[in-house]
Image: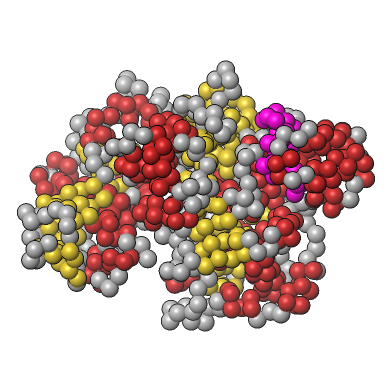
Amino acid sequence: MLELKSFLDIWKSLDGSARDGHPVALKILAESEKIFENHQEGLLQRNFWLDFLDHTKKPGFLHSLDGSVNCLRWSEVVFRIIRHTNYGMLDMMEQRVADHPHHVLFKDMSSATAVDWTYLQIYHHIREIAGLFYKTVPVDPRVAFYTENCLEGACTDLACLMFGIFDTPLSPHFKADVLLPVFNELKINVALADTDERLVVLQKIREKADVKFTIFSLQPATLKTRGIPYLVEEGKKISRSDIDSILGNIPSRPNNLVATTMFTSGSTGLPKGVSFSIYNIVSKRFARAAALPEVGDEVFLCYLPLFHTFGRYLEMTGAIFWNGTYIFAGNTSSETLLSLFPQMNPSGFISIPLRWQELYERCQEKIGQIESRELREQAVRAVVGLRLHWGLSAAGYLDPEVFRFFNQYGIHLNSGFGMTEATGGITMTPPGMYKDFTVGIPLPGVRTRLTGGSELELSGHYIGRYLDVAGPGDQIPYPVSDEKDLWLPTGDVFRISGDGYYQIVDRVKDIYKNNRGQTVAPQVIEKKFHKVPGILSVFLVGDNRPYNVLLIVPDRSDPIFNSLQGDNKDEYFHQIVMAANSDVAPYERVINYTLLPRDFSTEKGELTPKGSFNRKAIEGNFREVIESLYQSSVIRIDTGDFTISIPKWFFRDLGILETDIQHDGHRLINRRNGTSMPVRQLKGKWVQIGHLKYLVDSAVIDLGLLTRQPKIWTGNPALIAFCPVKE
């Protein structure tokens, strides 16, 4: 024990350069292992172990361990320390506040003027929020926040995770019929939302809920929400001494108690609750550090929502763990994100494949005519910023060429695979060691095995539990490394190479993710067409695609189908698809469809013996048909004077099909709802679009650009009414 204290003191006395590769790091690791092997950890005070965690998790120490094997050994020691000390998120935050109180934790870019929030400011703010919740519900407050990614939502979450308040982040795509059973099952007694529309939904739910919960607004009151207290204002009404008294009386809770439940789509499309303990969350942070020993003092440019595990755990709690700064991007459009890279200079970027593809394409545009290596590097850095040195692409397929490109310019873009149930990541390629078409190797702290059918199963320190097994008040057992531990099936079929790299081969579960990482359960859409006159079966396509399309097998024996001719037939199927789109999330909607000449066949391998779809076989056999539905990411309308370009997401967000917008020579018309917008040529290069006129140098008017840029559509009510603008 004295040796460990002495070695740690030596390490703390070294300056930055002297620490690099210093042998005392390995001595610290060996002595700490020996203490736990001899069960002597209780002879050292809790503060010592917290100090151990704070100093050994930094890049200098992990780099000095000299290799992934020793980092893995370190992580196993850390897991034991976390259990022994009951270490939690509050400990982590208080360490950071003590180390650098005035360092920026959150940078909010959601308004015209960026606002910086330091660690100390956020610490006091989350104490106010936690104090308010305990004052509102003194015993067992349970909080739901129903919001897009925003600073107050993040602070609410941290207040709950740090002060023993059960909470659940809910997707703003959930509607009242999904939310009500969630509120009832979790016995939610406090709820928050960020917009008038969502606050109104909460009010409607409260009328029917088993528990009449208190509602707080994350924005100042408006005419619609008058009478709903504003969270920030209510928190300021509590004195500092009262907050100290309230929070000082919170009973200690074991860190393996269920702290939060998140919801993910299951194979039926209904949200499935997954519960996590604080132990799951903090052990994952140290595990990720062991896999990324060079990462620390990070600046993250963030747009992933906090109701998804990567946004919540890897970015938000990761920023705190790594002494970092979390930048709320505000507008999540590609145009905004690309403009923020050279402006904010992030050091790390965690994203879906689509954003990395867009960064890659922007870099290719800049270096296309440049031959000099030095000038090419400068051009790439002009796109991604000067500090970007690592990134992660997960939740979908990304071409190996993109990984190789960024790695050759000193940006360690890692491939990964994860699940909500595993607190995010499960595997990741080691930095600088990417291999084509793989998702890397398992992270420290997770155990894996393949079943007889090669389905991957998981066990380990940060594997959550489904809500029907562990809910508020329940404990999630610590792993004990034997067959008594939970083994979670992933629903994915894997192949493991000789050097230990994992490759996804197929999916067992009948779900997929689009190229934005959003989970789509095709059965949710497909079952809407069951027993519809004129339809035998339908098949939804959209795996790793920007939007969904539908293959329809018509029932040619049906009298209704045979009575339809020409335009009537198109309109009939159009109306059916529109009806199916009416009550699903935007990313689940169908954008285009086609009628197939034949039904799906068992003989061709498209159906299993039980009659269910073999999705890979259908997509392979109808590849040409499918590709024809994805020929272009835009719809072009030629007016004679100019061309109007409308991206496919425009139709998706409006809930209409590709053929629903037409131009009559003077106006664009949405033939589904009857709305229209003037779009016509004026003198010279001036074009009237909506209520305003614009100077357009190009022969193409990009309606997507107009929609995504507030500086263009502000003050144009006709354009706002016609387009799915993003406030």
Judge whether residue 181 can be spotted in this image.
Answer: no
Q: Considering depth in this image, is 135 or 530 the residue closer to the camera?
A: 135
Indicate the quadrant containing the C terminus: top left, top right, bottom left or bottom right.
bottom left
Q: Whole-percent x and y of residue 532?
A: 28, 45
| Left or right of 223 in this view: 284 | right
Q: Whole-percent x and y of residue 393?
A: 48, 40
Q: Considering depth in this image, is 244 or 132 the residue closer to the camera?
A: 244
Residue furthest out toward the top? 498
| Left or right of 510 in this view: 107 | right
> What are the residue bounds of the magenta stretch?
52-74
Q: Whole-percent x and y of residue 202?
A: 50, 69
Residue in the image at 78% along x and 44% along y: 14
Residue in the image at 57% along x and 61% along y: 106
Colour scheme of the rendered structure: secondary structure
Q: Main secondary structure of the magenta part?
A: helix
Indicate the quadrant containing the N terminus: top left, top right, bottom left or bottom right.
top right
Judge whether residue 658 can be spotted in this image.
Answer: yes
Q: Is residue 63 magenta?
A: yes
Q: Considering depth in this image, is 646 or 651 the residue closer to the camera?
A: 646
Q: Is residue 485 magenta?
A: no
Residue in the image at 62% along x and 64% along y: 118
Residue in the image at 26% along x and 50% along y: 647
